[in-house]
Image: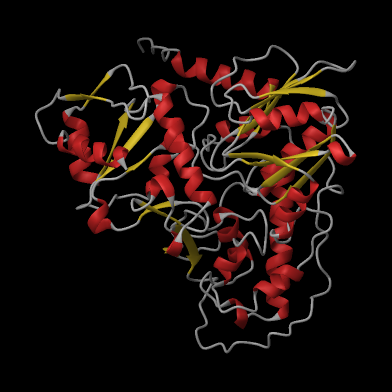
Amino acid sequence: MIAVRRIRQISALLRPPSGVGYRTFSHQGLAPSPQTVQIAAAEREAYQRDGVVHLPGAFSEDWVTYLREAFQQGMEKPGRDGKAEGMLSGQHSLTKEGSVMPSDRATSCNWCFLAQVFEQSLPSDLVQVWVFSPALPPTRDFRAFGSRRGSMVEGDGCHRIAAEHRRALLGRKMTAKSPNGKFKAGAQAINSSGGVLTRIEVHGKNMFYFFGQGAKMIVVHIHFGLAGAFAVYQGEEPEVTKNIRLRLETVDSGTKLVAHLSAMVVKHGKESFYDSLASKLGADPLREDANADDLVKGCSAAKPIATVLVDQAVCAGIGNIYRTEILYEAALHPKQPANTLTQQEILKVWNVAVKQMQAGFKTGSIWGHKKGAFCYGKKTSACGGKVKQFNMGGRSVYACSKRQRLDSKRAPLSDNKALPTRQRRSGTKHLGRSVSAVEAENKKRKTGEGLAVQHVALKDDATRRAALAARAAKKRPAARKGPK
């Protein structure tokens, strides 16, 4: 891949005297970034010390789009052993959850992870490149470097979007356009259907918007990935960026609304397209029709319970942070083989998952009603136990040595496990009012969490005003302290 070859050339510039720069490159008609990127002494020192360095502005926006599509292609058509086909072949491997890992540290040499692959809302002058040293592994998890938002849009975030859009958009007639041209056929199909939004479904991290009825019905499938947003504006419409795949505008007699969608995956098809995708996804704790049956079946395998819990074919919507917090509360070690769990333990995992994700839906925070994590990212858990961190499938997993103990002597139980009873009620309809998007974001800012722990895709006029205000506050110089 030519980008990786160029990164190797760039890495050689991390050792010369300060002030050496490089110009970004063009390939297959892609425009280079207009400015020369300077490599300072501090960046060389960081590279040699940490094994990773951040080089802003290294790729033009066209290159970012090209590489984002390469990543998406690898996600959609993984090759053997998890290696991506196409443009990423031989350079990266993709884990089941979509994280990028070096396919072979000895041969991949210096490789890059582009934050802009996911940071779709950043302007072109903030395109980021991280260069990794083959000789010195990064001192931190590379995903923490690569994405400022840090975490995929979880299932509760998707359900919050659906709940808001059912109130604001369901039944409205709209016209569709694809500003960046990447969903042109889909926009035309929406218009041909009549443009009336008739139904919204969510299965974990996958959203489905139904337009029209009968033979003309069109279903739009959305998966945000690690970034993206679905915003609805009633006031002044912000500038349409190159990342907006779909723009919707109401054309009926109701209040005028405009929606902007950016996401890693936006596809369309007929109702059979939805049926096919939905049938491959497991039980979603936030759907009204969910139960623990899929989890019971998933636990018949000898895989670790942590692996089963984030398998979207078993439990749709649970991500890395949720699984750590769920297993901590359920007092199960992440590496405990799933087929050694009792019916009561499986039921507890399911009930805790429903409870925590419902709290996330209500509050707009992955921590729910808690002040913060009980185990994830901690050195000491909420119960005072020492937390151990380890890697599972390319993701950091945490376990409390006091509360979660691995029982390696347990024998596998019978595969014929009956569906547990006394399950916690799933879904969201009975939960009452949820915290608004702007309330949730403002709370994150006040607590110092920012928006980095869990990416929030629900946007509207209020969140835009709050974001502009927060940005302006950062630019204001700090007030000088007077003499005592």
| Residue ID at (80%, 60%) | 290
Residue 316 x/y as whole percent = 67, 57
Asked which quadrant contains residue 320, the reply is bottom right
Q: Place residue 426 in its image quadrant.
A: bottom right
The chosen color scheme is secondary structure
User: Which residue is depicted at the point 64% across and 43% down?
Assistant: 365
Q: Is residue 179 above or below residue 415?
A: above
Q: Residue furthest left?
A: 17
The quadrant in which the C terminus is found is top left
The x, y position of residue 199, in whole percent, is: 84, 40
Between 411 and 204, the one lying in front of the other is 204
**Tag count in the figure?**
0
Q: Nearer the viewer, residue 87 or 146?
A: 87
Residue at x-position 67% and y-position 61%: 315
Q: Quick check: can you spot residue 392?
A: no
Picture quarter containing residue 144? top left
Could you tell me residue 474's position as x and y percent? 46, 19
Compared to residue 257, the image places residue 438 above or below, namely below
Q: Is 335 left, or right, of 171 in this rendering?
A: left
Is residue 274 placed above or below 180 in the rendered structure?
A: below
Task: State whether residue 65 appears in this view.
Answer: yes
> Residue 49: x and y, percent?
20, 44
| Nearer to me, 74 or 243 | 74
Is residue 162 toward the left or the right of residue 339 in the image?
Answer: right
Task: Tell me the quadrant of the picture where the N terminus can be found.
Answer: top left
In the visual, does 377 lie left or right of 236?
left
Left or right: 320 in relation to 38 = right
